[in-house]
Image (spheres, rainbow, N blue to C red):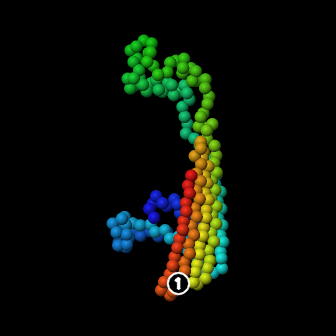
Amino acid sequence: FPVSSANMVNLSDIETIDVLKDASSTAIFGSRGANGVVIVTTKRGKAGTPKISYSGKFGFNDAVGHPKTLTGGDYGRFANSFNIANGKINTANADWTNKVYSDAEIAEMDKLNYDWLDEAWKPATSMNHSINVSGGSEKATYFAGASYYTQGANMGKQDYDKWNFRAGVDVSVTADLKFSATIAANQQN
């Protein structure tokens, strides 16, 4: 599958990951494989009694620290000095009528004590649940897996939810003929 589709594969469904970085990748995949190929093999059913596996993960996402920001008054002074240096404020004019921030505005800005980033930032959580079922006989095997991943946002409404489902069956019809079918679904918000 293309690299853009890699996010659609549930990690608990992966059997192996192989990297081909030699002439065999070009021989198999043509010019598109000239820089190497990553082969992801997903799990299939194995003969035996049914096996059910569950995996659950929980995470906590927060910042170690936030960058230091200017106060309102410091920003006003910086903006004025920046615009003087760029020639956007005419210092030859006695009252500087085209000044970005007046002295009165900067004095008011100095009275403010509000850090928007600290107010908006909130710790967030993430969790992943996966369940797989596999089994079968020597003639027919099956595998099914479903997963749910959710991640909260530290700022605003940027939550992420993803559902994956994959099921497959392998049936040996004769010694030389094998039937395989796979269905997969993915939903992301």
Instruction: Look at the picture and state if 188 lies above or below 53.
Output: above
**Residue drawn at point x = 55 percent, y = 39 percent:** 67
Q: Name the image quarter holding residue 149.
A: bottom right
Residue for badge 1: 173
Residue 168 at least partly seen:
yes
Local secondary structure at mark 1 = loop
| 182 relative to 25 in the view: left or right | right
Q: Name the image quarter holding residue 33.
A: bottom left
**Residue drawn at point x = 62 percent, y = 49 percent:** 152
- How far from the left and from the top, in percent, is residue 170? 54, 78
Residue 16 at least partly seen:
no
Residue furthest to the bottom in view is 175
**Residue drawn at point x = 55 percent, y = 36 percent:** 68
Under mark 1, the amino acid is Val
- How far from the left and from the top, in percent, is residue 105? 54, 20
- How far from the left and from the top, in percent, is residue 49? 66, 79
**Residue drawn at point x = 56 percent, y = 29 percent:** 71
Residue furthest to the left in view is 31
Q: Which of 146 and 127 is in front in this view?
A: 146
Q: Name the image quarter holding residue 98.
A: top left
If the image is split into quadrants, where does the N terminus sit?
Answer: bottom left
Residue furthest to the top in view is 94
Instruction: Look at the picture and state if 58 lies above or below 69.
Output: below
